[in-house]
Image (tube, grey):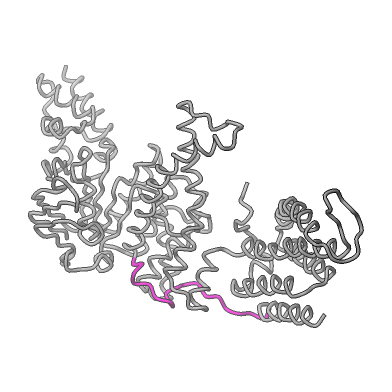
Amino acid sequence: MTGLLDYVQGESFLHRLNPLTKLVLSFALCAAVFITDSHLIIIGILAAVLAFSAAAGTVSRSLRILSSLGKLSILLFIVQILFVRDGKVLLHLPFGLVITDSGVLFSLLFVLRFMTATLPLALMLAVTRISDLANVLVKSLHMPYSYAFALTTAIRFIPLFAEEMSGIMETQTARGVEFDTKNFFKKVRLLLPLCVPLLISSVRKTEGGAISAELRGFNLRKRNCGFREYPLRVADVLAVLFGVAVILTVSVF
Amino acid sequence: MIKIQGLTFTYKDGARPALAGLELDIRDGEFVGIIGSCGAGKSTLTYALNGVVPHHYTGDMYGSVTVEGLDTVESSPEEISRYVGSVFQDVDGQMVSAVVEDEVLFGMENFGVPRSEIESRLEQALAEAGISELRHRATSTLSGGQKQKVAIAAIIALRPKIIVLDEPTGELDPRSSRRVFDTLRELNENHGITIVVVEQKIMLLCEYVKRLLLMDGGRVVLDGAVGDVLRQTEVFETAGVNIPRVATLARELTKLGYYSGATPTGLAQAETMMREVLGNG
């Protein structure tokens, strides 16, 4: 079982695009969702993103993300709909609460935006290796290498720390600590002391990593040291043009 | 060439010296094993060889360490690491990339290996470490032994003259441990790379290395060919290190007058010894 934001191996046209193109395209789609006020256009973008993920072979994951966002969206929808009081009243509720037509439309727009804006970025992460993303940020956008290194290291360490944490928890469970308690607050109280050993072992790990990187010339690294090339191909130009076209379209309508 | 003269080092905030007047000469192409109890100064010695001491871990340092003609105090860790490659015990901590290929590329990119050479060196390093088929795998999906070989491949690609390893099999099972040592032996014999390895598994170490050092209290207390060193069982006892049972057996047999040959360093030699003893008796 992979996390919802992990890289998914593949050879689709999205996988082969320049990481920078993917970044630009996903941000363009994201921006389009916020520029437009039309429900239909947002649904159209959502459909397009789903079509992209189908092409990249990650559609089941995209749907999983959508369904978890959907649960949150229902809550947001309910809260939002009760806040809007102008427009034609459709339904009177107790305590003076009302549901209006513009409330329904606005809340719908709100949750559609919420779901659709998240998806392109998730898709981008699914079809781009973090290391490629970091390399291209260093090479093309002149991000300092140490920042890019911190970014990739942080993402790489998440599963390691999770493993470490579950190791500590198992040890403590074997000694009779009840992590399986139903009481949420009690569980938090039991987990808090574990932060100290986790922190210590993490610092030790990162220290080892720092020494190992230093001894392999980390400090000598310059911007153009990267071996991998990320050329812009025709497909990249087309993809960026597509992004620009989407932005222009939604700005006009 | 490694030359250490009167090296005394106390970590900042350290109560007593981790190394106390250590003397050591290692010639090109040697395969040296270092053993000792916890706190004997083994790790600190490896740090002194690759420049982590005194550049990363600071403290009071006396004496001198010269590696390939470089004084480790005057040279930066980067300069030293052009000659000395280092592999550590923590297989996860020493990785810097999410993919095997990137891990091996990392050092070559940093040291500015010419583009035309990178691909061939990459393939060669993976092949020598015996992990060509892992090239495109994510490091997080590898076993401990495989990860340690990736770490070794990343070092081989840099073509160091010396490889220093600090308990490289500490997190590995016996079979993976042997594979790592097989790789080391090949690098030593076929490429003439000097190998200095700290290891707790004495039996494994004795089978592979040519020269064995026993450390105690920040000093080298025994130094010589494996068989000769293993003979001095009292020194091992003082240092708190168990010697292989075959060496104990050889000592007892010698004491009783049944055996007078060399101390066996592996199971094969132990078998020869037993055949000799039983044949005589």
Q: Eyeballing the image, is B214 above or below A135?
A: above
Q: Is residue A252 above or below residue B207?
A: below
Q: Is residue B252 magenta?
A: no
Q: B199 or A156: nearer the eye?
A: A156
Q: Where is residue B156 in the image (x, y as percent from the top left)?
A: 35, 60
Q: Which residue lies furthest to the top in this view?
A: B281
The residue at 14%/56% (across/down) is: B60
Toward the front, the furthest residue is A96
Q: Give the range drawn in magenta.
A: A217-234
- Where, quadrant-wise, is the C terminus of chain A in this rendering? bottom right
| Numbered marks: total | 0
Q: Position of residue B74 (x, y in %)?
A: 17, 68
Q: Where is residue A76 in the image (x, y as percent from the top left)?
A: 74, 55
Quadrant in which residue A213 is drawn: bottom left
* Residue depicted at 10% across the width and 41% down the height: B221
Residue nearest the viewer, comparing B40 with B224? B40
Front residue of A148 and B101: A148
Along the viewing direction, whichever of B241 and A30 lies nearer the viewer: A30
In the rendering, at what x and y percent does residue A220 appear? Answer: 34, 72
Q: In this view, does B170 lie to the left or right of A90?
A: left
The secondary structure that most of the magenta stretch takes on is loop
Tell me: residue A36, above or below residue B157: below
Q: What residue is drawn where x is 80% and y is 58%?
A: A81
Q: Image height check: is A154 above or below B172?
A: below
